[in-house]
Amino acid sequence: MVNTLKKKLVIEFLIIYCLIPLIVISINFFFSEQKIFVFLPLFLVFFLSLYLLKKTPSFSFESLKKKTEWNFFFLISLIFIVSAFSYTIILDSNLLFNLPKNYFFLWVAVMLLYPIFSVIPQEIIFRVLFFERYSCLFKDQFLYLVLNSIIFAYIHLVFQNFHAFFITLITSPIFAYAYLNKSFKTCLLVHTIGGQLVFTYGLGKFFY
């Protein structure tokens, strides 16, 4: 019975975190202008994740209501503000504040909608489902955390550039730490401020 359950979880894991991303990346390679091939699978896997979490006996959605760790959030926000600004300046100073300066209302829309339609689905899939349903498949927690970062960066290959992969690879451990050691709400806020800074500073061109 235990082996059967583990086999089922392994299959789920491979489909959600390996096969589906590979299909999405492959399709987007041929239809790079059709962004529906990026966001539609995200929402479909998001709802699938909610269903699987509901079926996970050891998990309760009540656990996601834990309070925000504000000190950690402000510390990480400061680090993101400085590091993202520096990254943009070093990469191409002409990108700086391009979106808010030239497309102000679009920037406002991104600031408001990004947390709802991007951050929440991503964190449910890549943090909550990943750590709450499939942790039993991995004995080495450190390698599990490394795998989480690699998988999170891997799906961002859909944007077909190095910067999306690199930025998500180095920020994923922070999101994972926030979820595992602080709270889901803290994780959401940290991810949100990181993404909002990316779009504000001009790095958003690598994530769309």
Image (tube, rainbow, N blue to C red):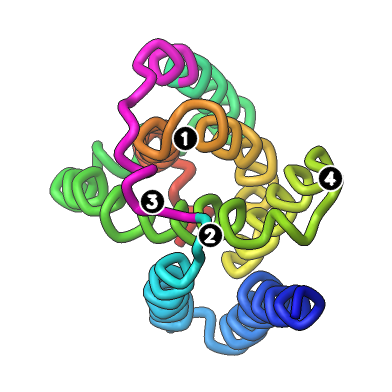
Residue linked to disc 3: 119
176 or 134: nearer the viewer: 134
Q: Give the x, y percent position of residue 35.
A: 42, 77
The earlier-in-sequence mark between 1 and 3 is 1
Q: Quadrant of the rendered structure where residue 130 is?
A: bottom right
Whether residue 96 can be seen here: no
Q: Give the x, y percent position of residue 77.
A: 43, 20
Q: Which residues are magenta?
A: 59-76
**Which label sits in the foreground, 2 or 3?**
2
Q: Quadrant of the rendered structure where residue 194 is?
A: top left
The earlier-in-sequence mark between 1 and 2 is 1
Does 169 sit left or right of 49 as displayed? right
- Main secondary structure found in the magenta portion: helix
**Which label sits in the foreground, 1 or 4?**
4
Q: Secondary structure at mark 1?
A: helix
Residue linked to disc 2: 129
Residue linked to disc 4: 143
Label 1 to label 4, Cα distance in Å? 39 Å
